[in-house]
Image (cartoon, helix red, strand yellow):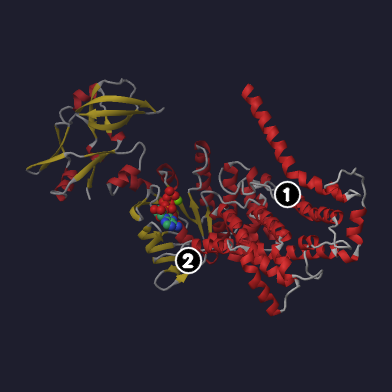
Amino acid sequence: MKEEKVKFIIIIAGSIFMVIFCILPFIFMALVSFSSRPDFLSARTLFSFTLKNYYSVLTTPSLHFIDYLRNSLVISGISAGFCVLIAALAAYSITRLSLPHKTFILFFVLAVSMFPQISLVSYLFKFMAGVGWINTYRALVFPYIAWILPLSLWILVSYFAQIPRDLDRAGLIDGCSRWQILRKIIFPVAAPGIFSTALLAFIFAFNEFMFALMLTSDHHARTVPVGIALFQGLHGELPWGDIMAASTITTIPVVILTIMFQRHIIQGLTRGAVKG
Amino acid sequence: MKLKLVSLTKKFTSLRGSVRAVDGIDLEIQDNEFFVLLGPSGCGKSTVLNLIAGLEKPTGGEIWFDDRVVACAKKKIFFTPKERNVAFVFQSYALYPHLSVFENIAFPLRIIGEDVTKIKESVKRVGAMLEISNLFSARPCELSGGQRQRVAIARAIVRYPNVFLLDEPLSNLDAQLRVSTRDELKRLQQRLGVTTIYVTHDQVEAMTLGDRIALLKDGRVEQIGTPDQLYECPASEFAAKFIGSPPMNIFEAEVSEEGEEFYIIIGGEKIKMPDDKAEELKRLKGRSCAFGIRPEDIHIPAPILRAWKSKRSQYLKAKIDLIEPMGRERFFHITINEHRFSLLTTDVRFKQGEVVDVEFDLKKLHIFEKK
Ligand SMILES: Nc1ncnc2c1ncn2[C@@H]1O[C@H](COP(=O)(O)OP(=O)(O)OP(=O)(O)O)[C@@H](O)[C@H]1O
Ligand SMILES: [Mg+2]
């Protein structure tokens, strides 16, 4: 009885602490974005509510926030889509076909992904400048796909490995080609894993900073994280209100995506495929 | 569809070395036959089935469907499962979890592009046959084991396969359901008249279902025959032990030859062999043998009979160690001079610890050569 109570208190206290710990920066961000005196970071000013910052972020043409947001969404969406498609095909062949040196391939991919971004970025810049892609979507989409692929591959390999092999065999018996097995059986069954991987890939690309900073030069391809970081006021001061309002808006697509996909990311969809 | 396997071999090479899962199997399976592959775990039953289905490529030998080679290692011929038109029921059922029961059954038809009204008809037909029409809209995860198993069978038979392959389809069901489904399966096979190959490690299932049984051991065929042949004349000690429940008593005994007569010595008692057994012993002279007798072939004679028969028969003194009632029969564990035997009887007069006379039915004695 007493033990139960202690446990309960610890769990509740722990959860509250975790939630506050994680959400406090967001609350701060939102508060600042709604404040008419956003420089209250240091000074002891009173909070007064305003939508001025949002209005200015969304309408000031020189800030290009809408452009950045569009760039971000398009680039991240394309990157995540291709990344998951490639990773899913690769994961299928690694888990199902008798490839030689499967484990080697898998670990090689992991090893490659361990290079720090900074070690790649100067070469990437040279390369992109050479092919004339600097400040285009392509300049970010291709590196993003390559950069996120290892993670997606590993997640999907572990997911596909859980799908019983008998489903593939049943598909073969029922007359499917390999491609039909993939499209009609494996992908639908693995849908939760594929959706969550896609979401993760999207968030990764959406938050990426280094490549975006180096490979873009203006609002034609610049993404939100870089764009916000480079916000400047008229006289070179940091416009905290605009920055925070922009950041708050930026979190919205991710939140919406998460809520949308949450329906799909339900566990245990394979239940009932095999015994038990 | 007639099936023929010619010295079929499958070698697996993995990190732990190479395994000959199937080691030169020759089989001929007749049209419409219910053929059972029986054997202990790991003897290569599933691998044979997968080879027939086209899910694995043989490393040696040939597979014939009627007079067509569908797989030949030497000539590099390999037909896919689709080309062979086989149906397979997996041990795990392997239903598609994202599809409803109806769609699961319709799946093979949709893949070959059957038209919609025909699909509906076919699915309804097998649904009615297997009494699962009321489950059509359910997902596999909502079904019980027995229902899943029916759906798996329905999916297998919906498109008139050439061969019907089943890999331990009943092993996930409880004992009662297993018996009723077993009977149903047999009836279904007779109705459909499709050549069927059924894999099991359960000898009762094999005996009740099979027109013929192939007993496998370590990737080889130990014996092929009808259930009765396997029971009456096991070809080896392994076959003798594997088939029959409770299993056959296997024992070693000294053989002594006196002129034309042969005797075996059990528990210090010399027992004269009948003529046919004597002949067999003569043939096996000099080689080491084992003897086998089924529990129901050891009798405890009634006292009156004993007095009457004692001139012609030889009795052995046996102590009853344990009695296991099994309903209609009783299963006795007995010792004859340190040798353990088991026997089956319907006699209820005896008690544990009692010493009784037993008699071996020597006509039913089996002699196996030791390898
Ligand atoms: N893909 C594989 N790779 C390596 N070895 C394998 C493979 N499949 C089967 N084997 C080996 O082949 C042998 C026969 O396996 P198989 O699955 O045919 O046995 P089984 O008779 O069906 O047994 P069970 O009754 O347990 O299902 C086993 O020793 C197994 O380890
Ligand atoms: Mg098996």
Q: Is residue B35 visible?
A: no
Depth check: give the residue in front, A143 or A31.
A31
Mark 1 vs mark 2, CA separation in Å: 37 Å
Q: Position of residue B135 (x, y in %)?
A: 67, 45
Residue under the image location 91 percent in, 49 percent down? A36
Identify the amino acid type marked 1: Gln
From the top left corner, tell me how far across and down residue B362 is, in percent. 22, 38
Q: Nearer the viewer, residue B250 or A55?
A: A55
What residue does disc 2 label? A100
Q: Is residue B56 above or below residue A130?
A: above
Q: Do the CB atoms of the residues marked 1 and 2 lie less than 8 Å apart?
A: no
Q: Quadrant of residue A124?
A: bottom right
On the image, numbered disc 1 is attached to which residue? A262
- A223 over B371 or under it: above or below: below
Q: Position of residue B343 (x, y in %)?
A: 30, 31
Q: Three-letter amino acid code at disc 2?
A: Pro
Q: Position of residue B168 (x, y in %)?
A: 48, 48
- Quick check: can you spot residue A211? yes
- Name which residue lies at 38% across and 61% down: B11
Closest to the observer: A192 or B97?
A192
Q: Quadrant of residue B353?
A: top left
Q: Is mark 2 within 8 Å of ligand 1?
A: no
Of labels 1 and 2, earlier in sequence is 2
